[in-house]
Amino acid sequence: MKAPDFIYCRAESLADALRLKAEHGDQARWLAGGQSLLAALAFRLSEPTALIDISRIDALRGITFDAGVVRIGAGTTHTALGVSDIIRRHVPLLAEAVPLIAHAAIRNRGTIGGSLAFADPAAELPACCVALEATLIAVGPKGERRIAANAFFEGVYATALRDDELLTWIEIVAAQADEQQTLVELTRRSGDYAMAGVAAVLRGDAAEITHARLVFFALGDRPVAAAKAAALLVGKPLDEAQVALAATASAQEIDPAGDLNGGPEMKTHLAQVVLSRALRQIMTQAKAKAERTAA
């Protein structure tokens, strides 16, 4: 297949990008890493009248840490996320997710903003942001708008972004001292989209969990928070009995459609498998941390 005809524009600044979007209208599309958009163009799944290249805007790149908040530019590549000391130290869930995203060539070009705005329900980063209770910042002609991650994703490839808005920054509160984060997914081959996955964020210790966020991906039309399963963990020790209860409860909170990988029953089973593995990983991490503290 061959991409449709379109006008190409390169924005030199955020203000320039918004000007170009206003000039070319709703049928113009932002171009950052292009790892999803260019494939969609080739298959005529998307036929914009103009592409606005935002990949050279310095203001959209970078990772900072201040006053307990990690701020990530939407134009930051997956590779930059994965090698950042700030991310590894303060948002380890993202560092853990990066190697699971496709392949190195795609990670070198793809951006966190592109992944979030594309909103593929099988992608890792949207689920991570929901589990981390991130805030997504968009800018448009009317100014800046802050959107909670759990309200940002509205369906398959659908988000709360308005047609004239550009996702600019992602803010995440740094992990607390007693916080454990992990991500587990199942794929047929390395680099494939997940058949099922979960991002888990827990606080507390082996004696008592004080906070839990469990968010599935590849099991619905958007990241799916398993609130009831998470609630079962809070106020109790994290042990095999609680892992089994949470896994069983999670099956009641998802309604996966069948796909090429299997039917709804198989997907539901895989959800329980990935959640059990994630919670056991956190148990292992918590135990190791306790042993280091005691030593």
Image: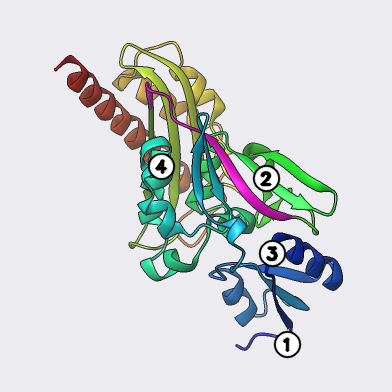
| Amino acid type of the residue that numbered disc 4 sits on in the rendered structure | Ile
Give the vertical position of 132 relative to 195 (above or below): above
Separation of marks 1 and 2 at Cα, in angstroms: 31 Å
Separation of marks 4 and 3 at Cα, in angstroms: 26 Å
Is tag 2's residue or tag 4's residue first in the polypeptide sequence? 4
**Residue under label 2:** 137
| Amino acid type of the residue that numbered disc 2 sits on in the rendered structure | Ile
**Residue under label 1:** 5
| Amino acid type of the residue that numbered disc 3 sits on in the rendered structure | Ser
The magenta region covers 166-179
Is tag 4's residue or tag 3's residue first in the polypeptide sequence? 3
Q: Position of residue 64 (x, y in %)?
A: 50, 43
Q: Please state which of the two labelled residues, at mark 4 or mark 3, is closer to the viewer.
A: 3
**Residue under label 4:** 86
Tell me, for residue 13, which label it has, or none: 3
Which of the two residues, 131 or 143, is positioned nearer the viewer here?
143
What secondary structure is the stretch in magenta mostly built from? strand
Q: Position of residue 121 (x, y in %)?
A: 57, 52
For label 1, count other residues whose C-alpha is less than 10 Å away and answer few (under 14), some (14-19) or many (20+): few
The quadrant in which the N terminus is found is bottom right
Q: Secondary structure at mark 4?
A: helix
Q: Secondary structure at mark 2?
A: strand
